[in-house]
Image (cartoon, rainbow, N blue to C red):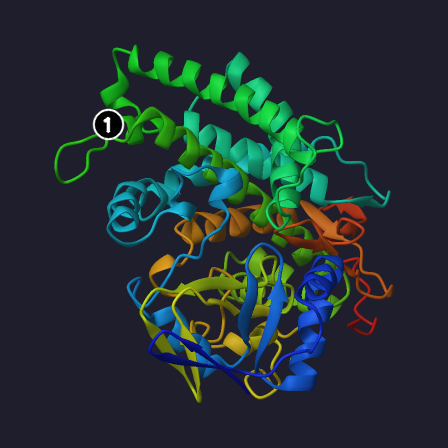
Amino acid sequence: MNAITTGDEIAVFPPGPPLPRALQALLFIAGRRRWLASLRHRYGSVFSVGLPLVGRAVVVADAGLAGQVLAAGPDVAGMPQPNLGRVLGPGSLFNLDQQPHRRRRRLLSPPLHGQRMRVYEDVVEDEFLREAGTWSEGEEFPLQPSTMRITLNVILRAVFGAEGAELDRLREIMPNLVTRASRLAFLPSLPLGRSRLNPAVRFAALRREYDELITSLIRRTLADSRIDERDDILSLLLRARYDDGEPMSHSEIADELFALLAAGHETTATTLAWAVERLRRHPHVLARLIAAVDTEDQTLLQSTIWEVQRQRPVIAAAARQVRAPSMRLGPWVLPRGCQIVVATDLIQTDEAIYPDAQKFDPDRYHGGRPDFTTWLPYGGGYRRCIGAEFANMEMKVVLRCLLRDFELVPTTEPGEKTHDRGVAFAPRRGGRVVLRRRRPARSGHSSALDLTSEPVS
């Protein structure tokens, strides 16, 4: 336990490794999940660590204290600086806090919640069918590139509502733009200027092209005489007004749409790849799920998605920064400016919370929903992911269509290891899958699935 004096405040930090912060930052970049898990094993569920960009931080893997952090208001524990706004744009929800965050969230919520999900379901199924038409039967391939195309096309159609040259170009540049943004998110600014070695240079060029495309689409939408009848997200945002009657600026809309396009497709696509990776290694769950889908019972489908998100979380942490003069966290006192990292993946694999946590078991949620204080794929508190309902709908539709139209051939291969894409954690081999078109079962015959295989961790 370390104590320092900050003005009239006495800050008491939890223990942590006695290594130079620069070295700790390098260890974090080299393998953050492995590094933080090793520190949890050595120092307990709350510890100090040196992180890239922010320096000294406190990592919380205790569910009770994590709940305290996430439940705190923005005046106590707000959005950290720097944050994803450095790559998604200063006008995105990721960079806003307190009253600006509340105002913007009210504007963004209606298109992503409630009855509108039914409108998007047909779009998701349409994009699934388009992509599934390119798949070959009986040949192993990584599913994640396909799910990335599905979810990107879905969010593009949901945002813009129509096809066109600009959308074709966005389909081309967004995967590269998202990949570069993910890699830059945890890297400090490099003193390389305009050098080709500077990863920010190409990102900036792609972002300028993105902004030009969005500006063109905004102008076209505003010129549409039927804009008031359109229900795409861009039209809704252009018509939306704050309580004082002011609209969002075009640069704010561009930043918000970039956040939706980036965060709104990569995380969902990656979770879908993990779902297939898990189901192929658990044939008994797969067989039950197929039977449930065939009877249009979505209870097990939903529980399976929840369990994939618990066991293979794509986003491993949620961050806050102390805004009050100090914040008590158990026996520790954290000073203003201290960054707090809620290690959601460590909480979701805590044996004290989830017995036999390494077991893939959708029945954990039988008869209820996850406990949102210990199940945190979308973060928590006032900054819980605004697109959670949209993402859940999308995953349910894609998995339902996949299991309706195809057999997933089980495998006894070990589970795929995790690949760090910068912000998201993906299956290292892309969620490899072997598919066969489903055909009507003959009387007296069961599915072609091999149900004698043992599940693989």
The quarter holding residue 76 reads bottom left
Looking at the picture, how far across and down is residue 457, in whole percent? 77, 72
In front of the other: 368 or 250: 250
- The amino acid type, in three-letter code, at marker 1 is Arg
- Residue 141, above or below 309: above
- Residue 2 lies left or right of residue 25; in this view the side is left
The quarter holding residue 182 reads top right
- Residue position marked by numbered label 1 in the rendering: 239
In front of the other: 45 or 257: 45
Residue lying at 66% horizontally and 66% vertically, measured from the top left: 21
- Residue 329, above or below 222: below
Picture quarter with the N terminus: bottom right
Outermost residue, left direction?
244
In front of the other: 280 or 7: 7
- Number of numbered discs on residues: 1
The quarter holding residue 130 reads top right
Residue lying at 63% horizontally and 43% vertically, measured from the top left: 184
Residue 84 in view here = yes
In front of the other: 264 or 39: 39
- Residue 167, above or below 83: above
For disc 1, the neighbor class at 10 Å (few under 14, some 14 to 19, many from 20) is few
- Residue 99 lies left or right of residue 125; in this view the side is left
- Residue 398, above or below 288: above
Looking at the picture, how far across and down is residue 321, in whole percent? 42, 63
Residue lying at 69% horizontally and 85% vertically, measured from the top left: 42
Looking at the picture, how far across and down is residue 452, in whole percent? 83, 72
Badge 1 marks a residue whose secondary structure is helix
Looking at the picture, how far across and down is residue 258, in whole percent? 48, 34
Residue 128 in view here = no
